[in-house]
Amino acid sequence: MKIAVIGMGYVGLVSAVVWTNLGHTVIGVENNSEKLQRLLAGEAPFFEPGLHSALAEAMQSGRLTFVETLVADSTLELVFICVGTPIGVDGLLNDQYLLESARMVGMLGDANLQVVIKSTVLPKMSDKVLEEVRLGCEERGLVFKGGVYFSPEFLSEGSALRDTLAPSRVVLGGEGLDQENLVVKFFKSVTPEAVPIVITDIRSAELSKLAANAMLASRISFINELALVADKVGGDINLVAKIIGLDPRIGPNFLKAGVGFGGGCFPKDTNSLINYAKTIGIKTGLLEAVVEVNQQAVIGFYNRVVSAFGDPVGKRLGILGLAYKEGTDDLRSAPALEIIERWRNAGGMVVAFDPLVVKIQAEKLGITSLDDATAVLSQADLLMVLTAEPEFINLDWERVSALYHGEIIGDGRRLYLAKVVNKAGFKLIT
Ligand code: UGA
């Protein structure tokens, strides 16, 4: 099929590349000229495992092209909208890019076009998209006869290609989604047979995306709250998580305690859901607590480590792991940023290393980024490990003892055993 994907972020670019490599012809639309230039040069604008080679393969096939704006094309069958919906000043998701994309589709697309929204939306935003597409068509004297559907995206950064090739489920929300519908046919063509395709009404589909992220965020805050109890009574929260995770009703995932959730999705989606619920007269007290516990996860960790260390003035904090989690170079809502700001405000200096965050990216944020963990270890007065990168999990403690002159290891991801760290001559704070 010939499809267009608007917005070349994590969702749009990865989907465009995967679908091209599965045999479809894809037009990737990106209006940020710097990003577009990089894409045209065959370069992904962000790091994602496997993306570099998958993008090269897709471009070589001749079936993937990148353009700044959609052009009228009667052979185009499907359009996916994957633009960002950042949180606005009102605390709700901003639909500006979404509606601009919808208008562009309405102004240029065929009147029978099928439009699938993949951007995260608040309930009823899909209806506004339909309205914009209709209006765009109307301005050209056409009556829009196609459809607008919502298909939530559940991929995670760091495993985006794998998640796109083999998702846990595909959800399609909208009307008229029978087996003959083009959108259903398309998703069947790109989805392994064992993966359930759930066809539902658009409102449930919209909410399912927010609900999935809110649920996962709740599990993280739950375990972070319990971690405080475990620490007080001398239990090991990693073991508690393992034990409860063995119950099939609970399961083992998203029960890793640490500095809390960050990134471009959980903080934005939980907060906007809370604020949206308020606008319809519903108080989401549980989610409010999830957000509060999450803020405390990073602040509490910082305070525990710093009160064991002493005054930051003139001291150098060494950070291993800048991104919001391992396996990505994404710094959005990264716990490291909160920690760096607090340390600096208290008069300290910071050096850091992250194997995936490129130096210029870190330096744009005023962070002195070093070449490797060794450099951080040898310069730091205090060390904090903030992501679970394999090389941080497997630190060579003999080397750490030889290089690091500080006394404390702040373990923001609960990666280490106290007895191992103590044996190496350090005090472990989690
Ligand atoms: C998340 C969801 O997992 C995806 O399903 C969803 O599609 C995506 O948001 C989105 O809405 O776009 P992502 O933000 O890429 O994906 O990363 P996660 O692996 O979910 O981690 C989110 C945050 O939670 C990270 O800061 C991570 O360190 C933290 N986390 C995760 C924990 O602190 N403990 C855990 O046990 C798991």
Image (spheres, rainbow, N blue to C red):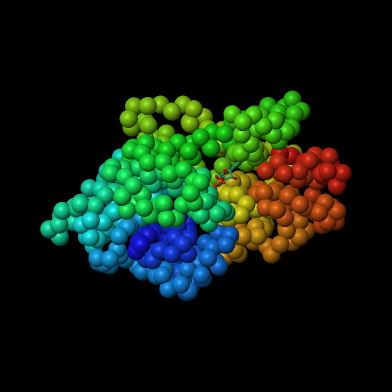
Residue drawn at x 34%, y 47% as measured from the top left: 179
Q: Is residue 242 left or right of residue 359?
A: right
Q: Quick check: can you spot residue 17?
A: no
x and y percent of residue 362 in the render?
Answer: 58, 60
Of residues 77 and 67, which is closer to you in this image?
A: 77
Seen in the picture, residue 249 relative to 351 is either above or below; the reply is above
x and y percent of residue 201 in the render?
Answer: 33, 38
Residue drawn at x 79%, y 41% as measured from the top left: 417
Picture quarter with the C terminus: top right
Seen in the picture, residue 80 relative to 124 is either above or below; the reply is below
x and y percent of residue 330 in the render?
Answer: 54, 55
Q: Residue furthest left?
A: 141
Residue drawn at x 51%, y 54% as measured from the top left: 165
Q: Is residue 179 left or right of residue 38?
A: left
Image quadrant of residue 233? top right
Q: Is residue 347 left or right of residue 268?
A: right
x and y percent of residue 203 in the render?
Answer: 33, 37
Residue drawn at x 61%, y 54% as measured from the top left: 327
Image quadrant of residue 23? bottom left
Of residues 106 and 351, which is closer to you in this image?
A: 106
Q: Quadrant of ligand 1?
A: top right
Question: How many tags in the picture?
Answer: 0
Picture quarter with the N terminus: bottom left
Seen in the picture, residue 240 relative to 363 is either above or below; the reply is above
Q: Quick check: can you spot residue 189?
A: yes
